[in-house]
Amino acid sequence: MKRYKTEDGQKLIYESYDRLLADWNVEHVPQMIPTTYGDTHIITAGSPDQPPLLLLHGTGDNAAMMWIYNMEELSRSFYVIAVDNIGGSGKSEPNDKYFGDFDRAKWLDEILGAMNIESTYITGVSYGAALAQYYAIARPDRVRKLVCMAGGISGSQFEVMGKMMKAFMPEALFPSERNTRKLLRKLCGTRTDVFESKPDLMQHWYYLLKYFNNRSMMKHTVTIHSPAEIQSIRSKTLFVIGDHDLLSYYPKSLARLKSNGMLYRIVKGAGHAINHEIPEVVHEEIIGFCKEA
């Protein structure tokens, strides 16, 4: 399966990806890690002597776009490893094994193993939050703490897909610069300016909507966990959710967090792009929670 709809589209995405990296304003090191499922592109920043922090992005984006407002500050406190999801719209290159029999836990095992990291903190956004929960449940000894942003505890596949359809349709079906702006205003809270004031960021997202084949990410499924599995990560998990987030801030989602006794923070004015919209609050929550004894 091709990840991009056209070769020209892939070129535009990669070129704009590099422009976003150049705007990160922190020294960083891109590298490829061979795994069973293909070559995984990661970007590191910060001193390797600091505690590791694995960053996991969402379904329709990539590391360069997701962490543009976060890498500089987080790398002051952590050795940050931003992963381009294999099969996603970044620079990771999946192979046939990925499309045939993908094991998410094994894939992350191999990334950490290549980095000589035995255990790590994890921060994930949207699908990245679901992946962080999955890995923490599957590999409890490898995850110290996890911060789940713009995500909750998934109740059913139907609920997950219903919320995604409501949030992204119809704009994502008809990608244009106008619809990109309309979708942005649906997904964000009060701070759409953090995107609209950066032409390269808006352009990159438009290219992703227009040229990335989202079916390439279908191997990254969302697991519905049992109550016992959720309880196994309760003491080391923090949820950070904006009160304008169409995908995470709604009664059923909040009720599941409460009934499971999960620690969570509601951030006023923030939407699904919470780490872009209010980065200073996000940094405070991540650093404070992870460094807390």
Image (cartoon, rainbow, N blue to C red):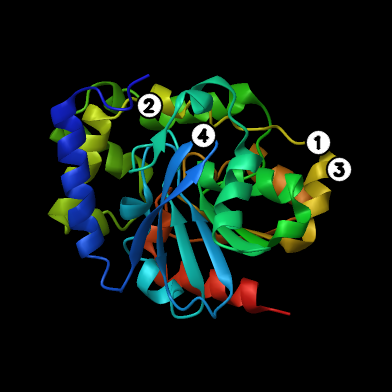
Instruction: Decide which of tag 2 and tag 1 comes sooner along the chain.
Output: 2
Work out whether residue 275 or residue 64 is closer to the camera in this orientation and state it: 64
**Residue corresponding to mark 2:** 214
Q: Which mark is residue 226?
A: 1
Q: Amino acid at mark 1?
A: Ser
Looking at the image, is mark 2 or mark 3 earlier in the sequence?
Answer: 2
Q: Which mark is residue 37?
A: 4
The percent position of residue 24, horizontal first and vertical second, equals 27, 66
Name the residue: 21% across, 27% down: 175
Against 248, is 199 above or below? below
Q: Residue at x 83, y 40 (%)?
A: 227
Q: Residues within 10 Å of mark 1 (few under 14, many from 20)?
A: few
Q: Which mark is residue 228?
A: 3
Residue 42: percent from left, percent from top: 41, 54
Contact between labelled residues 3 and 1, with CB atoms less than 8 Å apart: yes
Residues at badges 2 and 3 in contact (C-beta under 8 Å)?
no
Of tags 2 and 4, the one toward the viewer is: 4
Q: Please identify the quarter of the rendering in which residue 279 is found.
A: bottom left
Q: Nearer the viewer, residue 182 or 172?
A: 172
Which label's residue is closer to the chain start, 4 or 3? 4
